[in-house]
């Protein structure tokens, strides 16, 4: 079976950014493609306009590939483009088309009802359903979606949603992501992305972990380091972005990964995301630094403890201060993200957040207005009415006042949230001490990029 896997871009602006950094390669499709190949199928990954591949060339390359089925990956940010690509694929190639990813997983019925060209939604993790789909096709040359776990589809006017398979428990059984299958060529960028676990145990009300779930499922330390060695030896990679939701969920595992990197004398640099309550062990931070960690991304979200409790973060401001202090002490940058417009947000709590961001004295902090993604408890509580077939998701993820809806989780208007967000950025980055930290950090990143 020949499977074309397509990741539609979000916008021309986001595209220009993504083709220059690690965000470009869709690791989820890489895992699916690798599993299909391992089972004897043929797969290719296409990203329109990545590496200067415009749409007309994409269609030409897909036509040459001649797929038996097309799989399209969609998040809320690129969903409208994914709809357009689905229609075009169906028109040009007349093959079955399925769609997966967080957005259709969260809203499978509305996705199908609003897109008749789509044959099925594949909810949750895609590896096992796509293997089952390919096996069904090989048997008869057609697909009975009732036999595909995790598939949602419409048959004879009736919406059917199959039970999802259990999440993959032993991730070590998965092959390495097939980064060599991007547009049919080896990927010159993107080979520095690394996924060492799935799932996040956090209970944050703004987080859409609907595909991977809340159960933390890790690769073994040995598998993680083996993949690093594979990428360094085959592709010359020396800088890695660990894309886990929470790399530090299991401190013992992180200790072991770092021990292996150090013992093997791997000359690499890497970044990862963690939670402040999992980074309070000074010995762990020291070891991460020795193993090449140069930056940790922390979702601190707010400077108000009452808001922190309300959004289900499960941390305290004291934890955030201690964590950032330990990272700073040992020369590991902290990249802090804050949300403006959390549930229950007021002008006073925003001011607390801005003040707290400065108090942490981290390398960099970013401020973004809350986006109520489908699949989050915030969406279910306040925005459920937008779960409809004819919904236009254009601008849903916008940070500008032009976003097509008013916030409902706070009494502050979208214009007010935008003004306070601009104020947060300006007041944070225009302080002399912060400008000095940014300049020093820039020189550090330049030196890392040359290694």
Image (cartoon, grey):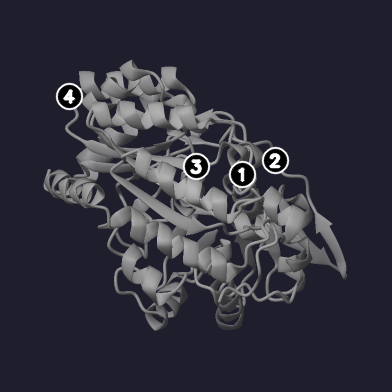
Residue 72: percent from the left, percent from the top? 56, 64
- Ranked by sequence position, the earlier of labels 2 and 3 is 2
- Ranked by sequence position, the earlier of labels 1 and 3 is 1
Comparing 94 with 238, the one in front is 238
Say whether marks 2 and 1 touch (CB < 8 Å).
yes
Residue 163: percent from the left, percent from the top? 77, 45
Residue 89 shown left or right of residue 288 in the figure: right
Residue 350 shown left or right of residue 90 in the figure: left
Residue density around tag 2, few if under 14, some if 14–19, many if 20 or more, within 10 Å? some
Taking the view exactly as shown, the residue that stands out farthest to the front is: 348
The answer to whether one can see residue 243 in this image is no
Distance between mark 2 and mark 1 Cα atoms = 7 Å
- Ranked by sequence position, the earlier of labels 4 and 1 is 1
- Which residue lies under the disc numbered 3? 303
- Which residue lies under the disc numbered 1? 128
Residue density around tag 1, few if under 14, some if 14–19, many if 20 or more, within 10 Å? many
Distance between mark 4 and mark 2 Cα atoms = 40 Å
Q: Quadrant of residue 237?
A: top left
- Ranked by sequence position, the earlier of labels 3 and 4 is 4
Residue 165, disc: 2
């Amino acid at each position: 079976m020949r499977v074309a896997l397509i990741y539609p871009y979000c916008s021309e602006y986001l595209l220009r950014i993504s083709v220059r950094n690690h965000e470009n390669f869709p690791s989820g499709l890489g895992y699916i493609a690798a599993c299909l190949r391992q089972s004897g199928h043929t797969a290719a990954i296409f990203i329109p306009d990545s590496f200067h591949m415009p749409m007309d060339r994409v269609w030409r390359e897909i036509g040459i590939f001649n797929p038996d089925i097309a799989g399209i990956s969609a998040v809320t940010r690129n969903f409208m483009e994914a709809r357009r690509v689905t229609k075009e694929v169906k028109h040009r190639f007349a093959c079955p088309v399925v769609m997966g990813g967080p957005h259709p997983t969260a809203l499978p019925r509305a996705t199908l009802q609003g897109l008749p060209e789509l044959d099925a939604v594949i909810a949750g993790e895609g590896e096992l359903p796509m293997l089952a789909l390919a096996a069904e096709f090989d048997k008869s040359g057609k697909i009975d979606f009732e036999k595909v776990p995790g598939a949602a589809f419409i048959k004879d006017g009736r919406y059917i949603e199959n039970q999802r398979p259990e999440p993959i428990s032993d991730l070590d059984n998965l092959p390495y992501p097939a980064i060599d299958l991007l547009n049919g060529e080896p990927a010159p960028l993107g080979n520095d992305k690394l996924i060492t676990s799935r799932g996040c145990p956090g209970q944050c009300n703004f987080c859409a972990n609907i595909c991977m779930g809340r159960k933390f499922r890790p690769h073994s330390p040995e598998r993680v380091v083996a993949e690093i060695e594979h990428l360094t030896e085959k592709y010359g990679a020396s800088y890695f972005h660990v894309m886990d939701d929470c790399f530090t969920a299991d401190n013992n595992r992180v200790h072991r990964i770092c021990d292996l990197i150090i013992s093997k004398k791997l000359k690499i640099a890497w970044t990862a995301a963690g939670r402040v309550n999992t980074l309070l062990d000074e010995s762990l931070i020291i070891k991460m630094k020795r193993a090449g960690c140069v930056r940790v991304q922390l979702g601190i979200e707010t400077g108000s403890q009452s808001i922190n409790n309300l959004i289900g973060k499960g941390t305290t401001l004291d934890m955030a201060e201690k964590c950032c202090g330990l990272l700073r002490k040992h020369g590991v940058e902290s990249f802090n993200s804050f949300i403006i417009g959390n549930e229950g947000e007021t002008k006073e709590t925003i001011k607390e957040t801005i003040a707290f961001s400065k108090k942490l004295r981290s390398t960099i902090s970013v401020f973004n207005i809350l986006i109520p993604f489908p699949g989050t408890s915030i969406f279910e509580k306040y925005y459920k009415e937008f779960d409809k077939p004819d919904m236009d998701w254009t601008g849903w993820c916008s940070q500008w006042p032009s976003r097509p809806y008013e916030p409902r989780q706070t009494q502050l208007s979208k214009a007010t949230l935008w003004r306070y967000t601009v104020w947060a950025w300006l007041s944070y980055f225009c302080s002399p001490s912060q400008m000095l930290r940014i300049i020093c950090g820039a020189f550090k990143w330049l030196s890392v990029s040359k290694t």
